Image (cartoon, helix red, strand yellow):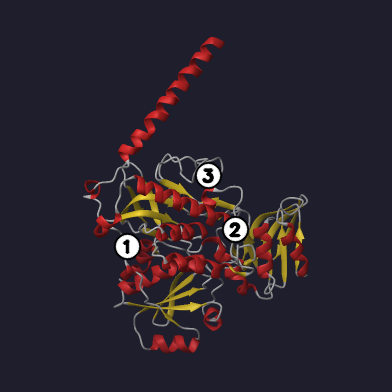
Amino acid sequence: MIKYIIIIIMVMAALYGLYKLYLPKKAAQEFSYNQQTMTKNALLVPIAILGGGPAGYAAGLYGARAHVHTVIFEGPYPGGQLMKTSHVENWPGIQKQLGSDIMKGCKTQAESFGAQIAPYTVKKIHTDSWPYKLTLLDGSEVFALSVIIATGASPRKLTIPGEDKYWGSGVTTCAICDAPFYKDKSVIVVGGGDSALEEAMQLAPYAKDIMICVRGESFRGAAAMIERLKQYPQIHTSFKTKVLEIKGTGTLVNAVTLEINGEKVERAIDGVFLAIGHIPNTSCMPEGMRVDSLGHIIISSESRETSVPGIFAAGDVSDHRYRQAGVAAGDGIKAALDAIAFVGSTGFIEKDNKKILYSPNKEGMYTALEHILTTAEYEQKIAQDNKLVLLDFYTTACPSCMRMMPIVERVVFEHKDAVVGYKVDAFVGAELMKKFVVPGVPTIVVIRNGNEIARTKDTMTYQDFNAFITEFIK
């Protein structure tokens, strides 16, 4: 038996050796660029970056700075998770700055070197042929010589009764987005890591009572963050605590059922903030790409290359250990350097292919929404117009709001003969928030003849939102 096992091992080793010898030749043949390669593909991106967070913007900076045509498809959450944080104290070279401001700076710097920003989401990467085809959410297609997946991760849910029902109406994952809606109210924060501590401290200037519910017996956050909690007397902690159910009036949260030390307790609260970890955003990745047991993309031990040649990964989508913005930016830089080298190895010469390079459709970046802040402004505007009116309630710190706004603008622009749109900054438009009973953002209210006829709190694709609005135009 041992003899047969040894023979099998020797055969497998020989086959692996042949594979290693064959792979570089195959890759050289498959990924060799010539003009004939692109005769059928008119929209080409040498470096396509999926995701507009620290990893994506850093990759875009390096790609463009190397004079390689680089497009950043920002996806549904421009700026990434730093857009949800307050002040960041551990970004190298900056002592203390708002996370949103850091991301705006990263984006501006990448653009200054020539990186092009596409406010679109890549739905799928197709690797059956090269250049790789990228399908966008609106159904359009572009072709990429190399791809950097920097799509980050999304907040994990509890999956308990009431969570989905009250999502956006008292259940949220973004304190920096929604904290002002909970002034003088009672809330709970679920989680025991740095994110939960950050959420609680962001709520402190507004909520009168904040309870951090931790499943375990202690925090998992950094000692410095735990120490900072002592500055906030309105924040207290309940260890060995599980949230079993979220209850409400039908429209708003008003209570939760907890299990504390094995005993069920019902607590009256006004909001639930979840900070229980994240799930890597890998829905766009091609079939067969290797991932680990937690769903993170596996990369080479020597580079940021994935199991698919020419496709690289950076940031939280491939990082289950560090999950830091600075680390993600470093990953993005490495991935860009890898992508630059890969594009160079294909024999692609950019100056000979200018006519087929893809650039985001600037005409599609509409500015159709006018700002209004007060009830008087609203009444004056709608009195002058008999069209369908859309009110887009948002905050600049809300990633979902920033995803929806260009979609709303595009729909308003395309139906400008029948629809007019306005945007309301929830932080300063309190009158209108109260008038329309808007508990959170994003919220889009549809009005005809001065009366509300529909609203949505969902983040939709262009196609879905267009279909939603078109129903009211007919």
Give the labeled residue for mark 2.
162
Mark sitting earlier along the chain (3/1): 3
Looking at the image, which residue is at 65% across and 56% down?
245
**Label 2 element class:** loop
Do residues under tags 3 and 1 come within 8 Å of each other at their CB atoms? no
Which residue: 68% across, 65% down? 200
Location of mark 1 (residue): 359
Kindly identify the amino acid type of the residue bearing the numbered disc 3: Gly
Q: Quadrant of the N terminus?
A: top right
Instruction: Answer with the quarter of the image where residue 168 lies.
Output: bottom right
Q: Dot 1, how many residues are within 10 Å of its Cα: few (below 14), some (14-19), or many (20+)?
A: some
Horizontally, is 17 left or right of 6 in the view?
left
Disc 3 or disc 1, which is closer to the eye? 1
Q: Nearer the viewer, mark 1 or mark 2?
A: 1
- Mark 1 or mark 2: whose residue is earlier in sequence: 2
Task: Identify the residue at image location x=40%, y=48%.
Answer: 341
Q: Quadrant of the C terminus?
A: bottom left
Determine the residue positioned at 35% across, 37% down.
27
